[in-house]
């Protein structure tokens, strides 16, 4: 049982890493965030990553909403993009190469878009799962935290991943059993130039052999809109899906959970969702799927309802996937999502007019 450091409210769903309740984050954000950010700073110091998106460097990165201004010889917040002799370069030294690990995941996979994905029915085929190192967020609940250890102290760990060229990755995608490619991690955002290059090569080769190779993205949705537009074009052309993980609606809750500026993040997510929706050229499969991890206590009915309200205004046919939470990383002390909380947020999303609301990772619910 953890007590909120500000109001004294006690609950087994309050994480020690956050230290405050969701109501204090909303009503007293300045004091609440000051306490939460201590956990982010302490953790990031352990793996030698910037505490906040740097803003004092000579060169500015525009790949994502953080817009890091990076000093010579230092990384951006993601740990992937560096300032090397006045140029932005990835940790691999070139955008022709990615740092990742990949595997073939037989259909049906545990994909966020599984309820609406046509490949879920294609048994005998596989998804090429491309797991990137690094991320432009610092989620306290991260469900795949190994991506941060892959770049600990600014080094590439050859035991955790490989450096592979965009053409070599395209070779893997040409395996007969591969019907789709999904970029995730971490997040594909810091690797977007590489992933876009690889995807163009994959689509070109797939057309030459008259094969289906869907290009999909699991992302936090914080890309520069010009990059997001290119990602969407590739998914449209290949029949793939963009899956945006919307963490929270209240800026202070978003900031507490992820470590970055919540106001800026919310504006970017909203803008990119609107952008992708405006590019919609088909109903099946949907171009866009939005998901939210239902973190106990913090992602409550209010958060999900507001996300659903926004989505419904843009397009009520955007599929919305609610994900069960497993205790991980710095929020290992929190219980899994309760069935009651999931029922409450599900009904809230439906009440706001979303036509397709799904519950996934339901086996985690308590």
Image (spheres, rainbow, N blue to C red):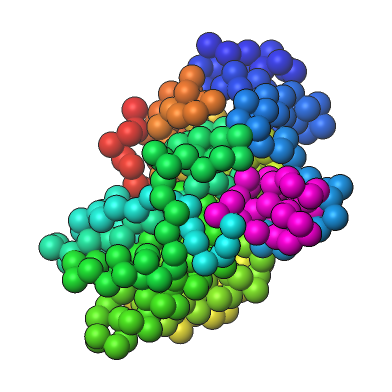
Farthest residue toward the left? 124
Figure quadrant of residue 151: top right
Residue 358 percent location from the top left of the image: 36, 53
Residue 287 percent location from the top left of the image: 44, 72
Taking the image as drawn, is residue 234 in sight?
Answer: yes
Q: How many marks?
A: 0
Q: Residue at x 85, y 55 (%)?
A: 58
Q: Is residue 155 magenta?
A: no
Q: Is residue 185 left or right of residue 211?
A: right
* Vertical arrangement, residue 235 with respect to residue 38, above or below: below
| Pick the front one: 161 or 311 | 161
Q: Residue at x 56, y 22 (%)?
A: 15
Q: Residue at x 39, y 56 (%)?
A: 130
Q: Is residue 206 left or right of residue 286?
A: left
**What's the magenta region?**
65-92
Residue 266 percent location from the top left of the image: 68, 54
Farthest residue toward the front? 85
Figure quadrant of residue 74: top right
Q: Residue at x 37, y 65 (%)?
A: 169
Q: Main secondary structure of the magenta part?
A: loop
If the image is split into quadrants, where does the C terminus sit? top left
Taking the image as drawn, is residue 307 in sight?
Answer: no
* Vertical arrangement, residue 319 with respect to residue 298, above or below: below
Q: Is residue 86 magenta?
A: yes
| Pick the front one: 329 or 81 | 81
Q: Is residue 167 left or right of residue 189?
A: left
| Pick the front one: 184 or 252 | 184
Residue 336 percent location from the top left of the image: 41, 28
């Amino acid at each position: 049982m953890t007590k909120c450091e500000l109001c004294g409210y006690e609950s087994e769903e309050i994480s020690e890493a956050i230290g405050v309740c969701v109501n204090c984050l909303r009503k007293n954000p300045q004091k609440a965030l000051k306490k939460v950010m201590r956990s982010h700073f302490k953790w990031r110091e352990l793996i030698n990553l910037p505490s906040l998106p740097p803003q004092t460097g000579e060169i500015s990165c525009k790949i994502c909403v953080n817009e890091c201004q990076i000093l010579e010889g230092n990384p951006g917040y993601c740990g992937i993009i560096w300032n090397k002799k006045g140029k932005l370069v990835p940790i691999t030294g070139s955008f022709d190469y990615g740092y990742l690990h990949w595997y073939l995941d037989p259909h049906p996979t545990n994909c966020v878009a599984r309820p609406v994905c046509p490949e879920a029915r294609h048994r005998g085929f596989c998804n090429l799962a491309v797991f990137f190192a690094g991320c432009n967020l610092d989620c306290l609940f991260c469900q795949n935290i190994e991506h941060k250890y892959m770049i600990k102290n600014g080094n590439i760990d050859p035991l955790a991943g490989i450096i592979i060229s965009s053409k070599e990755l395209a070779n893997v995608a040409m395996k007969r059993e591969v019907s789709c490619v999904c970029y995730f991690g971490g997040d594909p955002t810091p690797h977007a130039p590489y992933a876009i290059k690889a995807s163009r090569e994959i689509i070109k080769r797939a057309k030459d052999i008259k094969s289906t190779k869907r290009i999909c993205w699991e992302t936090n949705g914080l890309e520069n809109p010009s990059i997001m537009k290119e990602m969407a074009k590739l998914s449209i052309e290949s029949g793939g899906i963009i899956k945006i993980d919307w963490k929270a609606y209240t800026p202070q809750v978003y900031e507490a959970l992820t470590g970055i500026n919540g106001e800026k993040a919310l504006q970017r997510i909203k803008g990119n969702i609107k952008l992708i929706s405006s590019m919609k050229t088909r109903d099946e499969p949907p171009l866009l799927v939005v998901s939210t991890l239902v973190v106990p206590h913090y992602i409550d009915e209010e958060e999900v309802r507001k996300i659903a309200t926004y989505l419904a205004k843009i397009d009520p046919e955007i599929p919305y996937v609610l994900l069960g939470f497993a205790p991980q990383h710095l929020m290992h002390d929190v219980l899994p999502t309760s069935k009651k909380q999931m029922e409450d947020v599900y009904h809230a999303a439906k009440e706001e007019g979303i036509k397709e609301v799904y519950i996934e990772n339901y086996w985690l619910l308590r």
